Amino acid sequence: MAKFKIHVDQETCIGCGACTATCPDHFEMQETANGDRAREKKAETDDLACAKDAAEVCPVNAIHIKEGEKKII
């Protein structure tokens, strides 16, 4: 079972693509009614480093990472 849970808040995401450029293993862009938005490819992972880097470059803090109930980012 994966240790970390990744979530992209679609309401907050502005579709800049910084997360997909930083961590393409975990994030991808999808077309929505409001334009392109990021979404998680993998909702869970054991590898925190890449997902954390993507969360840190997100200009609107739309990426959230949890370990169990504890919020990492």
Image (spheres, rainbow, N blue to C red):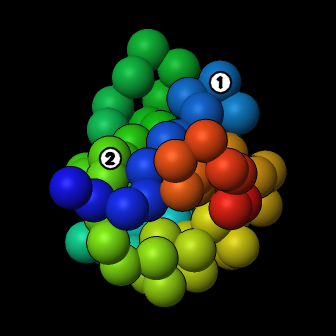
Q: Which residue is drawn at 60% across and 33% down?
A: 9
Q: Residue at x 43, y 50 (%)?
A: 5
Q: Residue at x 31, y 53 (%)?
A: 44
- Residue picked out by circle 1: 11
Give the percent coordinates (x, y) of residue 27.
Answer: 35, 59
Q: Is residue 30 left or right of residue 60?
A: left
Q: Secondary structure beneath disc 2?
A: loop
The picture quadrant where one finds residue 53 is: bottom right
Name the outermost residue toward the left.
1
Considering the image in quadrants, where does the C terminus appear? Answer: bottom right
Q: Considering only order in the chain, which callout, 1 or 2, is on the residue closer to the N terminus?
A: 1
Taking depth in this image into account, of 16 and 47 the one nearest to the observer is: 47
Name the outermost residue toward the top.
33
The picture quadrant where one finds residue 21 is: bottom left
Give the percent coordinates (x, y) of residue 59.
Answer: 77, 61
> What is the count of numbered marks?
2
Name the outermost residue toward the right.
60
**Residue 1 visible within the image:** yes
Taking depth in this image into account, of 36 and 23 the one nearest to the observer is: 23
Considering the image in quadrants, where does the N terminus appear? Answer: bottom left
Give the percent coordinates (x, y) of residue 16.
Answer: 59, 56
Q: Which residue is drawn at 32% across and 38% down?
A: 30
Tell me whether circle 2 and circle 1 mark residues in contact (CB < 8 Å): no
Instruction: Please state which amino acid type lies under the numbered disc 2.
Output: Ala
Q: Secondary structure beneath disc 1?
A: loop
**Residue 64 visible within the image:** no
Mark 2 vs mark 1: in front: 2
| Mark 2 vs mark 1, CA separation in Å | 17 Å
Instruction: Please state which amino acid type lies under the numbered disc 1.
Output: Glu
Vertical side of 33 occupied by 54: above or below = below
- Residue picked out by circle 2: 43
